[in-house]
Amino acid sequence: MANFEQGCAWAEGEYIPVGEAKISLFDWGFLHSDATYDVAHVWQGRFFRLADHIARFEASMAGLRMSIEQDRAAIETILTECVRKSGLRDAYVEMICTRGLPAPGSRDPRTCRNRFFAFAIPFIWIADLEQQNVGLHLAISERQRIPPEALDPRIKNYHWLDMVMAQYDAYEEGADNVILVDARGNLVEGPGFNVFALRDGTISTPARGMLEGVTRRTAIELAERVHYVVVERDIPIEQARDADEIFITSTAGGIMPVTRLDGRPVGNGLPGDATMQLRGAYWDLHRDPAYSNGIDY
Amino acid sequence: MANFEQGCAWAEGEYIPVGEAKISLFDWGFLHSDATYDVAHVWQGRFFRLADHIARFEASMAGLRMSIEQDRAAIETILTECVRKSGLRDAYVEMICTRGLPAPGSRDPRTCRNRFFAFAIPFIWIADLEQQNVGLHLAISERQRIPPEALDPRIKNYHWLDMVMAQYDAYEEGADNVILVDARGNLVEGPGFNVFALRDGTISTPARGMLEGVTRRTAIELAERVHYVVVERDIPIEQARDADEIFITSTAGGIMPVTRLDGRPVGNGLPGDATMQLRGAYWDLHRDPAYSNGIDY
């Protein structure tokens, strides 16, 4: 029997251990990064906002003119089965569509059959619980995030080299992670996360250039529920430096406090009250049937 | 015995038929397009400017802070062996370095062991000989190429979604392929090729934002040898429309004439004299030992 201890993947119609999950070297999903994906998570045996992730995945595929034979229900079944087979109670669950392989000798993407992959692996944290208790130290990079004029960031994509190179720069400054900017010096996003800044009771988050994260949306909903004013707008670097609180949001960790920016403390240098209130509310939501659904292991 | 008729790949220390060449679904080369590559070609049993391609590949790896155990000589041996095993006299030969897999649960690229892949497959033409006799019909896209402020284009990379989406738009206009622009409306490059425009005896090619192609460099060298003035400078869209001749350059096809731009003829609508002269000189160079080296099949 297959060993799914490290996680379970689905490829070409089969459930396989993650160590065996491979993609053709010639799939344009690799050779041209011509692919889209989405990541949902399972917490304590329940999917969180799975329908929202699958809906965004379908919108991303449509945006790239891709289609697969699996409909929404079939995708959900495959993802659920990956989690069930792995037995994981806390999981990081990814769905992927690649362009596929072109006809021999062709460079025309229209000759490709698009391909679907999925996997469930143990939950991944952008910042582990210990880091979250202290708060993250982020650097603001001078490097620009790939702009919407080149690639619509709402289509979730693997074009991450700008972020990876910015990460290396941040490590050299002693930071844990990095935020990239746009051409006008406004914050955009970091590798796999959105950014929020609170100042004088108003919470701001970038309005453009970034992925419209499901955790970002959840944070906005939760903040409005407890009567914060939330504004989607440009955040210039200097305003970020003046923030009372900063937090980041990601499926890979939820709502996480940032307590240092380029080596300087954010506010009083401790995880902020609003941040911690929203973080608690975020994890509470994982038991709410309106936001989550249980897996029958 | 393995069947290398469709080509030969090298992965994890083994030569394998291309149909079996795969990469882990979890390699960041795929999941973050965190990879670099280079493509050389073999024509009539001889590598063309292989040392230049390997040197650029090494510069790209250094730029991404990657390293592999293979030195220049070992890379050359592997590429040559891929061609020899395939028996191909005309081949498209790619070398790839991926970030690899991070430590379990980590998102830190420094925990990855970088990986090397290579393959030789039958030669690929951006435009086949029939298309080259007529000349290509290119569209100029409104979509911007990913800018250097996000990602240094001299590091050859798989971030192609901007180009793929521009290609789809071009197909709808009835064009064969597409040229992308920068934020100021200057031509940059197309999917896998550089662009040149000739006007009043002067040849211009973009100076920034694009890959510094080996075929581009060869075209510049050849043009200067026959006393054309070659200028690396911005080419605004309207100047491209006024060109007497336009051609593109790529390892996948050499120097290829463009005879229509957005449905309108370039010059007199026929492949240009300078273009055809340079194309001939380009293919002649493939027998020159200063530019090519024979493979001992």
Image: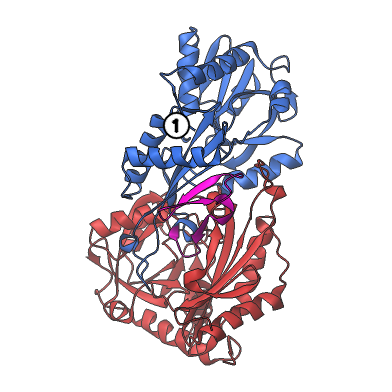
Chain colours: A red, B blue
How many numbered badges does the structure rendering display?
Answer: 1
Amino acid on which disc 1 is placed? Glu
Front residue of A101/A138: it is A101
| Segment colored magenta | B1-28
The local crowd at label 1, few if under 14, some if 14 to 19, many if 20 or more residues have their Cα within 10 Å, is some
Residue A241 in the figure: left or right of residue B182:
left
User: Residue under mark 1: which chain is it in?
Assistant: B
- The magenta stretch spans residue B5: yes
Residue A176 in the figure: left or right of residue A156:
left
How far from the left and from the top, in percent, is residue A168? Answer: 31, 55
The residue lying furthest to the front in this view is B1
Q: Quadrant of residue B34?
A: bottom left
How far from the left and from the top, in percent, is residue B118? Answer: 46, 46
Q: Quadrant of residue A139?
A: bottom left
Q: Residue at x 54, y 88 (%)?
A: A46
Q: Residue at x 68, y 43 (%)?
A: A108
Say whether residue A152 is visible: no
The residue lying furthest to the top in this view is B227
Circle 1: element type: loop
Q: Residue at x 37, y 65 (%)?
A: B102
Q: Quadrant of residue A14?
A: bottom right
Residue under pointer 1: B212
Q: Measured along the vertical axis of the image, is residue A214 above or below residue B150?
A: below
Front residue of A139/B179: it is B179
Q: Residue at x 59, y 92 (%)?
A: A296
Q: Measured along the vertical axis of the image, is residue A248 above or below residue A179?
A: below
Say whether residue A97 is visible: yes
